[in-house]
Every structure is written in C-alpha cells, then in structure tokens.
Image (spheres, rainbow, N blue to C red):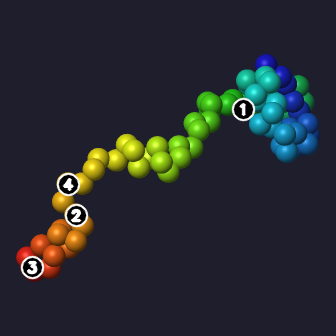
C-alpha cells in the first residue's frame, strides 16, 4: 500500500490508474495522518462485439412485417 500526501496525490492524478494497478490501494495523508483511501473497483470488462451481442439475442420467428401489419389491424 502506497502513501501519498495531498500534494503528491494531486500531482499523480494523471497517472492514478497506473499507480492503482501497481499498488492496489493508495492512502492519502495530510500532515502524516491518513485521511482517505483509494482502491481499485475491479478489472474492466471487455466490451463485447456487435456480433457477439447479436448471437446472444433470441431469434424472432415472426417477421417484423407481419407484426406491424397485425398491430395496425388491431387498432
């Protein structure tokens, strides 16, 4: 666990993600006393491709043209 003063934490904001990957947890201190703790939430989930999402969707047995026609006739 790494300890950073408030000033160091402000300077490290641009690469805070890398620090969290290395350390896992960072304690922020003011005058040597801990005032906060920053932890990583978890690993990023990969974004699925459109193809993968489409493959997970259930196939509709009735064509959309038929569904629209039925909806218009019902009203």
Q: Residue at x 37, y 43 (%)?
A: 56
Residue 66 shown left or right of residue 26 in the figure: left
- The reply to whether discs 1 and 4 touch (Cβ–Cβ < 8 Å) is no
CA separation in Å, label 1 and label 4: 50 Å
CA separation in Å, label 3 and label 4: 20 Å
Residue in the foreground of this view, choosing between 62 and 30 = 62
Residue 38 is marked as 1
Regarding residue 19, the answer to whether it shows in the image is yes
Q: Residue at x 39, y 44 (%)?
A: 55
Regarding residue 27, the answer to whether it shows in the image is no
Figure check: 31 above or below 70: above
Indicate which label's residue lies in the foreground, 3 or 4. 4
- Image coordinates of residue 25 in percent, x first then y, are 74, 25
Residue 73 is marked as 3
CA separation in Å, label 1 and label 3: 59 Å
Judging from the image, what secondary structure is the residue with disc 3 in? helix
Which of the two discs, 1 and 2, labels the residue nearer the N terminus?
1
Judging from the image, what secondary structure is the residue with disc 2 in? loop
- The reply to whether discs 3 and 2 touch (Cβ–Cβ < 8 Å) is no
Residue 63 is marked as 2
Indicate which label's residue lies in the foreground, 1 or 4. 4
- Image coordinates of residue 10 in percent, x first then y, are 87, 43
Indicate which label's residue lies in the foreground, 1 or 2. 2
Which of the two discs, 1 and 3, labels the residue nearer the N terminus?
1
Which of the two discs, 1 and 4, labels the residue nearer the N terminus?
1
Where, quadrant-wise, is the C terminus in this rendering?
Answer: bottom left
Figure check: 30 above or below 11: above
Which of the two discs, 3 and 2, labels the residue nearer the N terminus?
2
CA separation in Å, label 4 and label 2: 7 Å
Q: Residues within 10 Å of mark 1 (few under 14, many from 20)?
A: few
Query: What residue would you read off at disc 4?
Result: 61
Which of the two discs, 3 and 4, labels the residue nearer the N terminus?
4
């Amino acid at each position: 666990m790494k300890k950073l003063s408030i000033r160091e934490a402000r300077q490290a904001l641009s690469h805070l993600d890398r620090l969290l990957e290395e350390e896992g947890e960072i304690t922020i201190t003011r005058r040597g006393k801990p005032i906060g703790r920053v932890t990583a939430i978890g690993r990023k989930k990969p974004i699925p491709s459109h193809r993968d999402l489409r493959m997970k969707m259930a196939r509709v047995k009735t064509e959309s043209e038929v569904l629209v026609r039925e909806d218009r006739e019902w009203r």
